[in-house]
Image (cartoon, rainbow, N blue to C red):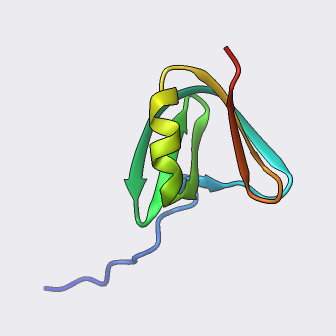
Amino acid sequence: MNYAVSEFKPILESPHRLAEPEEASGKLLSVSCRDGFAVASFSWGAISLPEEMREQLEPLVGKTVCILRLDGYHVRAVD
């Protein structure tokens, strides 16, 4: 017996995409690649970013960071 499987993830499981102008901040717990995006995980949830940002974010894991989307993405460590 075959069942149809949806390729879409429920909204609660999908990482949030930042809108302009929006900021995500908090302690960065991990960074991974999923479905062609970099996924940054925080204690409050996760956001999806362009895949090429993974290399920039990996050294910041464990630190408090702010990621601002305003005419592109701007990342800074707060510590």
Q: How many dots with numbers?
A: 0
In the image as oriented, which residue stretches furthest toward the left?
1
In the image, farthest residue toward the right: 21
Can residue 25 be seen in the rendering of this structure? yes
Q: Residue at x 61, y 32 (%)?
A: 44
- The residue at 46%/30% (across/down) is 59
Residue 1 falls left or right of residue 70: left
Q: Is residue 5 above or below residue 28?
A: below
Foreground pick, 30 / 7: 30
Look at the picture and state if 4 lies above or below 50: below
At a point 45% along the width and 36% down the height, the residue shown is: 58
Residue 53, percent from left and from top = 53, 51
Residue 31 appears at what percent x and percent y? 44, 40
Q: Residue at x 40, y 76 (%)?
A: 7
Quick check: 70 left or right of 36?
A: right
Looking at the rendered image, the quarter that the C terminus falls into is top right
| Residue 69 place in picture, x, y as percent | 77, 51
Looking at the rendering, in which quadrant would you find the N terminus?
A: bottom left
In the displayed structure image, the side of residue 58 where residue 25 appears, left or right: right
Q: Is residue 13 visible?
A: no
Residue placed most toward the observer, 44 or 67:
67
Closer to us: 8 or 3: 8
